[in-house]
Amino acid sequence: MADTVKTTRTTRAGSMREARETSPTSDTRTRNTTRRAPQPGPQTKALHAERERYLPRGLSTYHPVYPATASGARVVDVDGNTYLDFAGGIGVMNVGHSHPAVVAAIHAQTDAYSHTCAQVLTPPPYIALAKRLTEITPGKFAKKALLINSGAEAIENAIKIARAFTKRPAVITFENSFHGRTNLAMGLTGKVRPYRQNFGPLAADIHAIPYPYCYQCAFNRHDGACCHSWEVALERAFLTRVAPEQVAAILVEPVQGEGGFVVPPAEFLPSLRAICDQHGILLIADEVQTGFGRTGKLFAVEHSGVIPDLIVMAKSLAAGLPLAAVVGRADIMDAPLPGGLGSTYGGNPIACAAALAVIEVFAHSGLLERAQTLGAATLARMRVWQKRFPLVGDVRGLGAMVAMELVRDRARRTPASGETAALLAEARTRGLILIKAGLYDNVIRLLMPLVTTDEELAEGLDIMEESLAAVSAQPASAFNGAH
Ligand code: PLP
């Protein structure tokens, strides 16, 4: 549990809502810095004890903080502490917590009806959303969309569809990737601990090759050449493990999310597209974390001009309601037999109504530009930290998908996993929610709502800087062996 909150920052929900309605960058929110925040308060303590008692340890949590309300970029906990939220429920709240347009759409749909099941009576919001998704995704060809409940479920369906269309079994995926926790998604995920460990047997005919992660090169090369080694590895995989004509799909995150916000070189996606075209392999983009504005485009593949055959999305699609989608070429999407796709809750009308509202917010509120501004300002600040704190080994990002990788030894790039965990705790006690990522759990990743104001961004970055200073001031021995 956290000790005490050193700084308290609160904002009135009403004024936040007004501010968001007028402009995503407006700084008119009222701050009440005088309110004292007991931390952890009695309700937090009680809830934490119950969490430990009733929830399995496999469902770990970054922070012992229990929300009561949330609005914009702020979360208020059950004891009245206010936090700036730079995690957004792991990239789900791109339009901000409790966006009024989304809340109104949810209310309206809930008043009308909440469920019929698309396979029994298809809710019109399902059809409306499918149409909108085919319009806003890259590619000018005929498309169709399947709606389901989670990122992992969408990944599973994308692979099913690709196999049914190509009549091929194999899938190429990447090391250090994350695609979810169901069996097939786990098999596609390129990190053993904790995602795959002890959960076998995993699905067969999945072949992982290194992602171009130049800072922590899989081939231990730091001369930039590793950024092309994935191509060599793929050619070898085609010779040693699976013939290309057996491969249904290559599944790729345009920027690796859980892997530590790894931004590949510009030529990566175009090269993948060319390889897919050469061998009749489908290209599936996993935009679960990169999608819906995070990188400054609605979908991260748009930065490359590459058009995937299928795009998988979830997270910020419905601003917190469980909803995911597979969107792609109509002929591919139509490959499974009638009844081969579906799920009881998939495309639930309330979630669809929320998603339609999210798409409208993106169409009219300048959030894509805001993502670029937030990301650029954050990267600039992180570059200053990189000069000041040896702990900051690498800073990187695309749009507002920004991260810094912490290392104990810059020359060897030794992951500073313990220091990263300590930084999360330091920031929390100062009122900022951060999360980490990375193969070595040593990357601080920022997924702040795109409605975060300039003032809130400065406040959050100030807290990060204070926290970095506090962690850097401790001897390395304080973290040895920590994870
Ligand atoms: N794919 C990516 C890139 C993700 O980041 C995630 C979740 O973090 C998933 C798939 C799985 O999504 P879900 O947790 O909704 O199953």
Image (cartoon, rainbow, N blue to C red):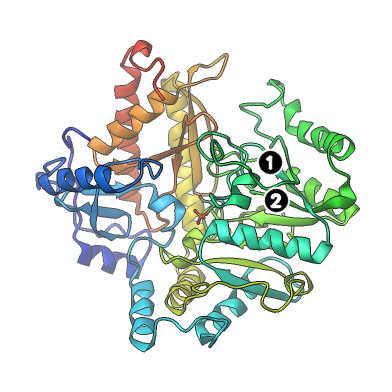
Task: Using the numbered discs, state the Cα–Cα distance from disc 2 to disc 1 in whole angstroms.
Answer: 8 Å
The quarter holding residue 463 reads: top left
Measured along the vertical axis of the image, is residue 165 above or below residue 459? below
Asked if marks 2 and 1 touch (Cβ < 8 Å), the reply is: yes
Between 378 and 224, the residue placed more toward the observer is 224
Three-letter amino acid code of the residue under disc 2 = Leu
Q: Quadrant of the C terminus?
A: top left
The quarter holding residue 305 reads: bottom right
| The disc label shown at residue 251, or none | 2
| The disc label shown at residue 174, or none | 1
**Residue 242: x and y, percent?**
85, 42
**Residue 5: x and y, percent?**
17, 37
Sequence order check, earlier mark of 2 and 1: 1
Between 201 and 187, the residue placed more toward the observer is 201
Residue 305 in view of the camera: no
Q: Quadrant of the N terminus?
A: top left
Count residues near mark 1 (Cα–Cα under 10 Å), then give few for <14, some for 14-19, many for 20+. many
For image coordinates 59% across by 46% down, the residue present is: 186
